[in-house]
């Protein structure tokens, strides 16, 4: 069985994407634990950005090392790949996370999580509208709306949601989702002729270094990265390395909508894993069950729509 036939099988997309979402979902509570072990305050944005920079630089190193071992050769970018790596680096790592960290400092976590869910819509619109890589069908739209409803519900337990908006708060969070959506589309385009693991590794490493430089420029201090918290930092780096590389491989062989729709599972995993790792038991309730059902329905509709498109080609 060739790679394309294997990675387009629905069961492979399902389990592959869910592994990515579970890893990304675990990042939410682990980042909080990491800040705690290193003594980084919730309002210390420069230190948080420094932490993220080290995380992504290590993620790039791990991606290149693991990919080189698995492919039995050193993964080196081609000369013509440098521009693509720079674009992915700016979108996926630098812009997404700079906007996210600054925005998060000026808005509530619940609103940030809900706005982040918009990236699925943006990715599909960019893929279909700007790059004509697939068609937007009513089934995909309905699937996205149902999945997004699940994201909203899972974030409302025990939280008050207001409609106050600010550009450097909610606006920056939205710009973060736009950057991520564009990165997904560009990764798919570039993966047609490039190794997505190589692209992921080098864009992470470069993006991490840029974020470290930005954090230091904002007043962060290297002494804030303490040895005590290195275990969690290394785990978070591995999360990015494994999840984003696998995500890139899935995007290479499938419609953007078929893969990105699973992104609605990130906050669901995040809530469940936060309840376990942070002992936030009050997060788990009927809202989580309802959210899981809605997200599952949304994923099913979008995946089946992509399957129907393939069959009709």
Image (tube, rainbow, N blue to C red):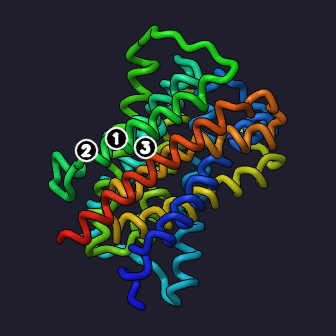
Q: Residues within 10 Å of mark 1 (few under 14, many from 20)?
A: some
Quarter of the image with the N terminus in it: bottom left
Question: Where is residue 81 drawn, in percent x and y?
Answer: 29, 68
Q: Which residue is mark 1?
A: 142
Q: Residues within 10 Å of mark 3 (few under 14, many from 20)?
A: many
| Direction from residue 247 to residue 233 in the image, left or right | right
Q: Quadrant of residue 39?
A: top right
Kind of element beneath mark 3: helix
Question: Where is residue 194 drawn, in percent x and y?
Answer: 31, 74
Q: Are marks 2 and 1 in contact (CB under 8 Å)?
A: yes
Q: Is residue 20 above or below residue 96?
A: below
Determine the CA span between mark 2 and mark 1: 6 Å
Q: Nearer the viewer, mark 1 or mark 3?
A: 1
Quarter of the image with the C terminus in it: bottom left
Q: Quadrant of residue 156?
A: top right
Q: Is residue 101 visible?
A: no
Indicate which disc, 1 or 3, sits on the residue closer to the N terminus.
Answer: 3
């Amino acid at each position: 069985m060739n790679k394309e036939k294997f990675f387009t099988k629905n069961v492979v997309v399902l389990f592959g994407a869910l592994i990515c979402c579970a890893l990304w979902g675990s990042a939410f509570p682990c980042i909080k634990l990491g800040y705690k072990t290193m003594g980084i305050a919730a309002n210390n944005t420069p230190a948080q950005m420094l932490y993220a920079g080290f995380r992504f630089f290590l993620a790039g190193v791990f991606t290149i090392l693991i990919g080189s071992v698995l492919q039995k050769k050193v993964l080196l970018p081609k000369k013509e790949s440098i521009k693509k790596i720079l674009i992915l680096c700016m979108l996926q790592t630098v812009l997404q996370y700079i906007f996210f960290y600054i925005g998060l400092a000026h808005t509530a976590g619940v609103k940030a999580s809900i706005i982040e869910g918009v990236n699925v819509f943006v990715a599909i619109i960019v893929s279909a509208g700007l790059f004509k890589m697939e068609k937007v069908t009513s089934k995909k739209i309905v699937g996205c709306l149902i999945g997004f409803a699940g994201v909203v519900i899972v974030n409302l337990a025990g939280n008050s949601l207001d409609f106050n908006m600010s550009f450097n708060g909610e606006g920056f969070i939205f710009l973060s989702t736009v950057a991520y959506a564009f990165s997904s589309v560009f990764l798919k385009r570039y993966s047609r002729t490039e190794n997505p693991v190589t692209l992921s590794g080098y864009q992470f490493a470069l993006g991490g270094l840029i974020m470290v430089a930005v954090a230091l420029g904002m007043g962060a201090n290297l002494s804030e990265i303490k040895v005590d918290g290195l275990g969690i930092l290394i785990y978070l780096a591995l999360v990015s390395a494994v999840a984003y590389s696998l995500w890139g491989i899935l995007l290479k062989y499938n419609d953007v909508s078929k893969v990105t729709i699973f992104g609605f599972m990130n906050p669901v995993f995040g809530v469940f894993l936060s309840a376990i790792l942070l002992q936030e038991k009050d997060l788990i309730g009927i809202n989580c069950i309802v959210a899981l059902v809605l997200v599952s329905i949304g994923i099913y509709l979008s995946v089946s729509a992509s399957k129907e498109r393939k069959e009709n080609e």
